[in-house]
Image (cartoon, rainbow, N blue to C red):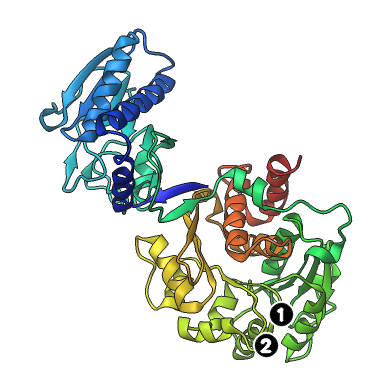
């Protein structure tokens, strides 16, 4: 995991570091890190031309240290005062944006970068708010950003990802004392997703999926297949109202899923009987929003003895956040986690307002209000747990996932990870990361949700399997 900090959190961390090392040494380390990243972008220094846009603060000082190192390595370096920069920078191979750091407020109109030049931002791109990621004026779009000690929230939120390019975090000896969140990495999946024991059996990681309805059978397929490909040893699939003679059963029923017939109106009772041998429950995708369905979903979630993932129409059934809290609390006295997985529209229906620009705060609010783990979907997915305010982030999402049904697959993956024994907040965050990384194995254009379960299995096999 990588710590993520606000500007205030970074200042607190810097202050802690200054108790044992002087500021000049921290600037030297930061400048060295900038120079190392610049050399990697250039493929060496000798013969290359570099322009360093340097402001008056520590950000500019970092850039000047890097300028000296690059010049000694053989680069032709020009240091330009950010406050007096020309409209167009001189011809170069690399621009180092050390104009303004995280403390900048106002509007920044960056000079024009020569055609073909790469841009390396120092800490955060100048003109991008270090907390919110809001771009003011006309910042430079960085090819890469080298940031110090920890990710800044502004690199992940708002306009930040559009301006920061590839981000690397440089360790300059500053202990992070006030992290606001943690960013999931591939290594976390390897470390936290438990391997299958030698003597395991199919019921040890069984998942029940309650999804679909006549005309919405695809949602059931996607959730069930997602669970199976993410390691569920058994998938018990229940589609309320499905006719035993329809196409879902006759020709398209997922081969790896065992059918649970839900023909009676009070179908939650049947599902609860099945849950005795399952380790997790996924409920909601494609169920529909009829009054009777809403009632059964609420009864099922409240009475479930195993961890529950609630998605799509299941979220609608929970109602507003206060109503959802009562259902999440349950009526059996069993302490089992519930994971809510809204996209922005579903979040607005639950919370009564859209999530806004601060997705970390929005996820925390929903978790506290509902008493459930809240996974707020998006290109940056935020997963908050009730009580401690902790947030896990996945930045693996991409436009490839902006297609119908991908969320159904995600709900199945979360269910599988819960069934494999991963704690709820981690199960949700790891699943979001795997979901996004798996999509990266598919085509840039034309990825469809049914592709995803196979890609999830392929990514897990390449990353987690020995």
Question: Which residue sits at x=76%, y=51%?
Answer: 195
The answer to whether residue 245 is above or below residue 72 is below
Could you say where residue 59 lies in the image, as x and y percent from the top left?
24, 34
Which residue is situated farthest in the front direction here? 20
Residue 305 disc label: 1
Q: Assign a secondary structure to mark 1.
A: loop
Residue bearing the label numbered 2: 332
Are dots 2 and 1 in contact, CB under 8 Å?
A: yes
The answer to whether any part of residue 157 appears in the image is: yes
Could you say where residue 87 lies in the image, as x and y percent from the top left?
14, 28
* Quarter-of-image position of residue 278: bottom right
Q: Which of the pair 153/17 is nearer the observer?
A: 17
The answer to whether residue 50 is above or below residue 280 is above
* Quarter-of-image position of residue 17: top left
Question: Which residue sits at x=33%, y=37%?
Answer: 20
Could you say where residue 61 lies in the image, as x and y percent from the top left?
22, 29
Residue 452 relative to residue 391: left or right: right
Nearer the N terminus, badge 2 or badge 1?
1
């Amino acid at each position: 995991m990588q710590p993520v900090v606000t500007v205030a959190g970074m200042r607190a961390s810097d202050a802690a570091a200054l108790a044992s090392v002087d500021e000049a040494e921290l600037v030297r380390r930061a400048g060295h890190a900038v120079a190392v990243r610049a050399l990697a972008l250039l493929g060496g220094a000798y013969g290359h031309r570099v322009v360093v846009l340097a402001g008056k603060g520590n950000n500019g000082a970092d850039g000047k240290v890097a300028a000296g190192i690059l010049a000694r390595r053989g680069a032709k370096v020009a240091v330009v005062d950010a406050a007096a920069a020309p409209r167009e920078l001189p011809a170069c191979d690399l621009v180092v944006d050390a104009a303004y750091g995280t403390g900048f407020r106002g509007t920044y109109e960056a000079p024009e970068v020569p055609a073909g030049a790469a841009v390396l931002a120092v800490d955060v791109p100048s003109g991008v708010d270090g907390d919110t990621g809001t771009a003011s004026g006309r910042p430079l779009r960085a090819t890469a950003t080298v940031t110090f000690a920890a990710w800044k929230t502004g690199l992940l939120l708002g306009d930040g990802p559009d301006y920061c390019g590839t981000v690397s975090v440089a360790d300059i000896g500053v202990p992070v004392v006030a992290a606001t969140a943690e960013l999931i990495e591939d290594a976390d999946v390897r470390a936290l997703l438990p391997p299958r024991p030698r003597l395991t059996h199919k019921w040890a990681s069984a998942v029940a999926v309650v999804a679909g309805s006549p005309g919405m059978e695809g949602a059931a397929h996607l959730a069930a297949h997602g669970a199976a490909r993410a390691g569920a040893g058994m998938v018990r699939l229940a589609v309320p109202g499905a006719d035993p003679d329809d196409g879902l059963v006759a020709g398209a029923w997922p081969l790896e899923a065992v059918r649970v017939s839900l023909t009676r109106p009070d179908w939650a009772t049947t599902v609860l009987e099945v849950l005795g041998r399952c380790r997790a429950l996924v409920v909601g995708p494609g169920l529909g929003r009829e009054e009777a369905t809403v009632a059964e979903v609420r009864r099922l979630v409240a009475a479930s003895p195993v961890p529950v993932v609630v998605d799509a129409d299941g979220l609608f059934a929970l109602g507003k956040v206060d109503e959802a809290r009562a259902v999440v609390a349950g009526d059996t006295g069993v302490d089992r986690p519930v994971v809510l997985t809204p996209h922005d529209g579903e979040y607005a229906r639950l919370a009564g307002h859209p999530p806004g620009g601060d997705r970390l705060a929005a996820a925390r609010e929903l978790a506290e209000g509902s008493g459930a783990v809240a996974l707020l979907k998006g290109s940056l997915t935020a997963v908050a747990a009730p009580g401690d305010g902790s947030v896990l982030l996945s930045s693996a999402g991409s436009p490839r996932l902006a297609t119908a049904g991908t969320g159904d697959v995600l709900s199945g993956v979360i269910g599988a990870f819960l069934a494999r024994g991963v704690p709820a907040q981690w199960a949700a965050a790891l699943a979001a990361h795997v979901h996004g990384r798996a999509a990266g194995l598919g085509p840039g254009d034309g990825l469809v949700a049914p592709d995803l379960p196979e890609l999830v299995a392929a990514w897990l096999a390449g990353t987690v399997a020995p």
